[in-house]
Amino acid sequence: METEYGVPTASVHTDVFEPLARAQALSRGMPKQRLVFVPQPVMGKSPVELRAYVDGNDPTTGRPFMTEVLEALTRPVSSEETEVVSFDRSTPRLCEPDSEDNLHELFLRENWTDKLPIVLPTEARVEAMLKGTSRDPDQVVGQMRPTAPREAWEYTVAKVAVNAVMAGARPEYFPAILALASTQVTARPSTTSSAAAMAVVNGPIREQIGMNWGVGAMGPYNHANATIGRAYGLLSQNGQGGSLPLHTYLGSQGNGYAYGSICYAENEERSPWKPFHVRQGFEFDDSTVSVFSGCRSTAYTLGLRKKHWQTHVIQMLRGMDPHETPTLVLDPITAHQFVDRGGFDTVDTLIDW
């Protein structure tokens, strides 16, 4: 409205979102955007309490909220406010040479890591990782963003390789990591409900790179599972322009699954049903990755009880996140119990139930 029509506007936010609101305005080339703030939270407050917000002060300035709104809406728009600012978002390809300890500190300080130790991505290591694919290093893989209002950042095969090295992955894992990058679904989403992502691998590549689809598959017990998932998280964080609390990440409590993105392979051999990728239209011999978003709540059970198992399953599902469709990750024994006790000879019949 300001830039096209010269009409003043006032953007209202809760105070905890102030850094994000100002960063958003800056990233869109409008650093002078008029912003006003009310206290957090808004959800669950009574009309009387909300009215008190409006009649009270802007918590970021201490000035009356309505005074700031009226001033923002009546003050003429200046030429400085309508001037769109552009930025040079290019970054140098290499860091300046330094000691190993100093470089680790640099990566930590610049928020390029998940706060755990990394493998420094030297040119030689990145070149070795790139041998795991026939893709051109400069080929654009996709774009990511932490949340819809943020701008999308573009990343190449080489940039994905850098993050794969940092995660400690091996070149033979790189096709799976590159496939995850190509989904353009971030493993570092920004939502107050603290979401994460889960990556599932299907097809021959599972065995080719030594993934785990048996005991402990979802835990920290397999190098391929662990580093592919970690690489997915790092490439999401760095490929989308960051995952910094109060700026590009606003998860209220955070999500422990974000460390490894729960990466594992499906146990196709022991499943009573068709593998997940086949149910999505791929061939048995195709190697695929699938991303599940959300991962806000988890319930574990050893299997179906002999009696009253339907009630048990229903109660478990009722205790899950009501905003997301639940995903059942089943031990093969439990999957066969669903077939034997419930007659669910296909996944679709179980879903319908």
Image (cartoon, rainbow, N blue to C red):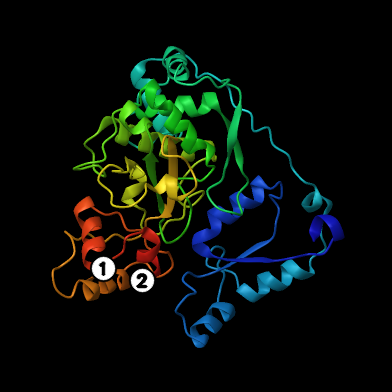
Q: Which residue is drawn at 19% across and 61% down?
A: 301
Q: In this view, does 352 lie to the left or right of 94?
A: left
- For residue 353, which numbered disc appears in the image? 2
The residue beneath circle 1 is 342
Q: In this view, does 16 lie to the left or right of 102?
A: right
Quick one: which residue is furthest to the bottom in this view?
48
Q: Which of 251 and 261 is in front in this view?
A: 261
**Residue 292 to residue 217: above or below:** below
**Residue 160 coordinates in the image, percent (x, y):** 49, 29
Q: Which of marks 2 and 1 is in front?
A: 1
Q: Which of 176 and 244 is in front in this view?
A: 176
Q: Residue at x 58, y 20 (%)?
A: 136
Residue 106 appears anywhere in the view: no
Name the amino acid, label 1: Gly
Q: Residue at x 47, y 38 (%)?
A: 180
Q: How crowded is mark 1: few (under 14 residues within 10 Å), some or many (20 or more)?
A: some
Q: Residue at x 59, y 56 (%)?
A: 21
Q: Is residue 71 left or right of residue 279?
A: right
Q: Do the residues labelled 2 and 1 touch (CB within 8 Å)?
A: yes
Name the amino acid, label 2: Trp
